[in-house]
Amino acid sequence: MSLPPKAWIWTRKVRGKTITRGLTHEKAHKMKLAIANHRAMDKIIDEMREIAQKLILESPETTQTFKLENHPKAPLT
């Protein structure tokens, strides 16, 4: 079994530049929880998109169509 590192490093991109920060063990734990929560939220949002798309595409058409009468166009000035 491997031992946890003595120093945690968090790296991310900000405006195209790589930012690296050292984290304490406590902050690293909180960051892991935040990342896990974010991934869970992304999964829920993906499921919501799939459900909405399914409802929209598979529901019967509820919009009415109207026949447009042939009106003369107004001249452009």
Image (tube, rainbow, N blue to C red):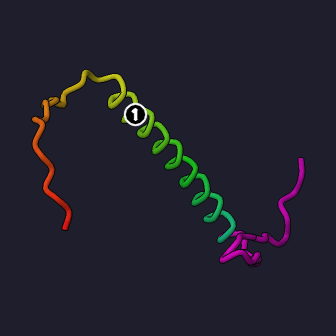
Give the residue number, with chain letter if any, for mark 1. Answer: 53
How many numbered callouts? 1
Residue 2: x, y in percent? 89, 52
Q: The disc labelled 1 sits on which kind of residue?
A: Gln
Query: Which residue, as the protein is rendered here, is positioned at the far right?
Result: 2
In magenta segment, residue 10: yes
Residue 69: x, y in percent? 10, 35
Residue drawn where x is 61% and y is 57% of the image: 35
Please provide the residue range marked out in magenta.
Answer: 1-26
Q: Nearer the viewer, residue 26 or 62?
A: 62
**From what the image shows, is residue 3 above or below residue 12?**
above
Name the side, left or right, on which 67 lies relative to 33.
left
Q: Quadrant of residue 5?
A: bottom right
Q: Nearer the viewer, residue 11 or 57?
A: 57
Residue 48: x, y in percent? 41, 39
Secondary structure of the residue carrying tag 1 is helix
Name the side, left or right, on which 21 lies relative to 45.
right
Residue drawn where x is 67% and y is 76% of the image: 14
Name the side, left or right, on which 37 lies relative to 12.
left
Residue drawn where x is 33% and y is 31% of the image: 56
Sort mark 1 into few (<14), some (14-19) or many (20+) by Cα contacts within 10 Å: few
Q: Nearer the viewer, residue 58 or 6?
A: 58
In magenta segment, residue 23: yes
Q: Nearer the viewer, residue 16 or 63?
A: 63
Residue 47: x, y in percent? 46, 36
Residue drawn where x is 39% and y is 28% of the image: 54
Name the side, left or right, on which 1 lies relative to 62.
right
Q: Quadrant of the C terminus?
A: bottom left
